[in-house]
Amino acid sequence: MLDADAVLIAAPAPAAARLLAAESPVAAAELSAVEYASMALVTMAFRRRDVLRMPKGTGFLVPPVDGRTIKASTFSSHKWGWIDEAGPDTFVLRTSVGRHGDEADLAWDDTDLVRLSRRDLGEAIGLSAAPVAARVTRWDGGLPQYPVGHVERVARIREQVGKLPGLAVCGAVYDGVGIPACIASARKAADEVLTSLAATLATGGARDTGE
Ligand SMILES: Cc1cc2nc3c(=O)[nH]c(=O)nc-3n(C[C@H](O)[C@H](O)[C@H](O)COP(=O)(O)OP(=O)(O)OC[C@H]3O[C@@H](n4cnc5c(N)ncnc54)[C@H](O)[C@@H]3O)c2cc1C
């Protein structure tokens, strides 16, 4: 048991729904309806001398109509200066596999995801070199999806949660999945609970600490 003046729930929708089920069943039901996409990232390191003809730029996206296993590739050594500096003789890139409604390829084991990524990279950019290292990172339920009506759903959740003074929600489920949007939603939630706390204290409604 933790006695707190205010609580921010910064968990993904399924966990937030469970945490809110007793106190705010309507918000919990709305959160339970949020769908998530799963994906896997395949990170590969090559000897730089083996990949001298990499395209310029930081990578590419693959449209669904192409029917590929990979959905995107990021040329990490081009994108991030620190990766380039940390391993000037190494070229690092990653592919991503799986998108919302298209997750069957995630059933492949890690070895096959590396093989399929290399096949698609070979056909897309002519990469034939073998990586010196590869790692598969799986993000099950990693990204909340925003269908039409998401903004209204979030408004309904906030309205319900707002009825409970000292409680607020934040994170990727609400105003955007990118990290800057997550931070902004956390700041907004912190402001909300501080404001509601101040209002409670101003009206003499401080919590009973037993003292
Ligand atoms: C593969 C991938 C690549 C991405 N790339 C980018 C990118 O390049 N740029 C970008 O801006 N964004 C990117 N994103 C999106 C971004 O990283 C996420 O949307 C963001 O990190 C989510 O932050 P969050 O705090 O909402 O959730 P999380 O970071 O998932 O934090 C939620 C926390 O809640 C905790 N938790 C779960 N259940 C409970 C519980 N019952 N009680 C208490 N705590 C609980 C979890 O342990 C976790 O620590 C990417 C996402 C993925 C999956």
Image (spheres, helix red, strand yellow):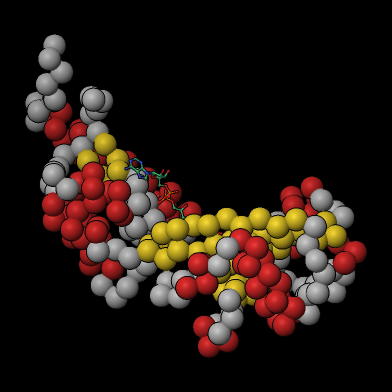
Q: Quadrant of residue 51?
A: bottom right
**Residue 185 x/y as whole percent:** 36, 51
Residue 32 visible = yes
**Residue 196 x/y as whole percent:** 19, 39
- Relative placement, left or right, of 134 versus 154 is right
**Where is the C terminus found, in terms of image quarters?**
top left
Outermost residue to the bottom: 65
The one of 105 and 19 positioned closer to us in this rendering: 105
- Relative placement, left or right, of 72 versus 167 is right
**Residue 131 x/y as whole percent:** 78, 62
Q: Residue at x 29, y 53 (%)?
A: 14
Q: Residue at x 28, y 68 (%)?
A: 150
Q: Is residue 102 above or below residue 9?
A: below
Q: Residue at x 12, y 15 (%)?
A: 210
**Where is the N terminus found, in terms of image quarters?**
top left
Q: Is residue 147 above or below residue 63?
A: above
- Relative placement, left or right, of 188 versus 98 is left
Outermost residue to the top: 211
Q: How many marks?
A: 0
Q: Residue at x 79, y 54 (%)?
A: 84
Residue 76 visible = no
The one of 125 and 133 positioned closer to us in this rendering: 133
- Relative placement, left or right, of 161 versus 169 is left
